[in-house]
Image (cartoon, helix red, strand yellow):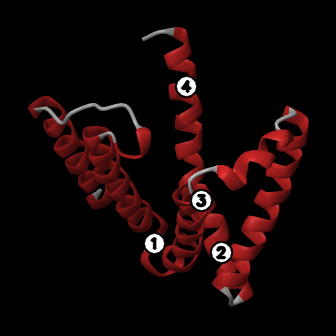
Amino acid sequence: MSTESLRYALWMLLAGIGIPILAALNGQLGSRLGAPVAAGFVLFSVGFTAASVLLLLSGQAPALATVSVQPKYLLLAGLLMAFYAFSITWVAPRFGVGNAVFCVLLGQMIAATLIDHFGLFGAAVHTVTVTRAAGLVAMVGGLALIQRG
């Protein structure tokens, strides 16, 4: 594995570590407020502030001028993020963080496999081979074993 690939893998590992932490923290906030939607609003307000600072520091703010000419379906990513955040905030305290994240990971693996196989949304094509399918099944099995333990 190249140094660059290792760096990307570690970065995404940290992002993955953040998902159950986000679920636990925002779920707790939603429970304490008695309002999961309010907790989601707080989550996005803090996230918006952080993204705004990063946008300004990176010097990439001028790129926003071209958003209006981009394909509108690309903006669905924001709706999907909101759906995830509100869902995990509401479900995790009721279903358990582990159970909720298990289902999220399962959905991610299935969707990622389909996106790669068909090259959806401009992704590089990585067809599902027997080996890749076996790896997916092994990951699902591993996730199931983690939940049983």
Q: Distance between the residues labelled 4 and 2?
A: 30 Å
The mark that comes first in sequence, 1 or 2, is 2
Q: Which mark is residue 28?
A: 2
Q: Name the residue under label 4.
A: 8
Residue 99 falls left or right of residue 57: left
Residue at horizontal 19 percent and vertical 41 percent from the top: 138
Tell me if label 4 and label 2 are in contact, CB under 8 Å. Answer: no
Would you place residue 69 above or below residue 45 in this image? above
Q: Where, quadrant-wise, is the N terminus in this rendering?
A: top left
Identify the residue at horizontal 54%, vertical 62% (top origin).
Answer: 76
| Disc with the residue nearer the chain's start (2 vs 3) | 2
Indicate the amino acid at tag 2: Gln
User: Which residue lies under the disc numbered 3?
Assistant: 75
Write the residue at 55% across / 54% down: 74
Numbered label attached to residue 96:
1
- In the rendered structure, the answer to whether residue 12 lies left or right of residue 39 reads left
Marks 3 and 1, the one that precedes in the sequence: 3
For the residues labelled 3 and 1, the Cα–Cα distance comes to 30 Å
Q: Distance between the residues labelled 1 and 2?
A: 11 Å
Is the residue 58 above or below the residue 5 in the image? below
- Looking at the rendered structure, the secondary structure element under dot 3 is helix
Determine which quarter of the picture holds residue 89: bottom right
Q: Which is nearer the N-term, disc 4 or disc 2? A: 4
User: Cβ–Cβ below 8 Å for labels 2 and 3?
Assistant: no
Q: Where is residue 16 in the image (x, y as percent from the top left)?
A: 52, 45
Which residue occupies the extreme top position in the image? Answer: 2
Q: How far is disc 4 from disc 3 in space, using C-alphas? A: 25 Å
User: Viewed as shown, does residue 76 lie left or right of 138?
Assistant: right
Query: How would you rate the neighbour count of disc 4 (Cα within 10 Å): few for under 14, some for 14-19, many for 20 or more?
Result: few
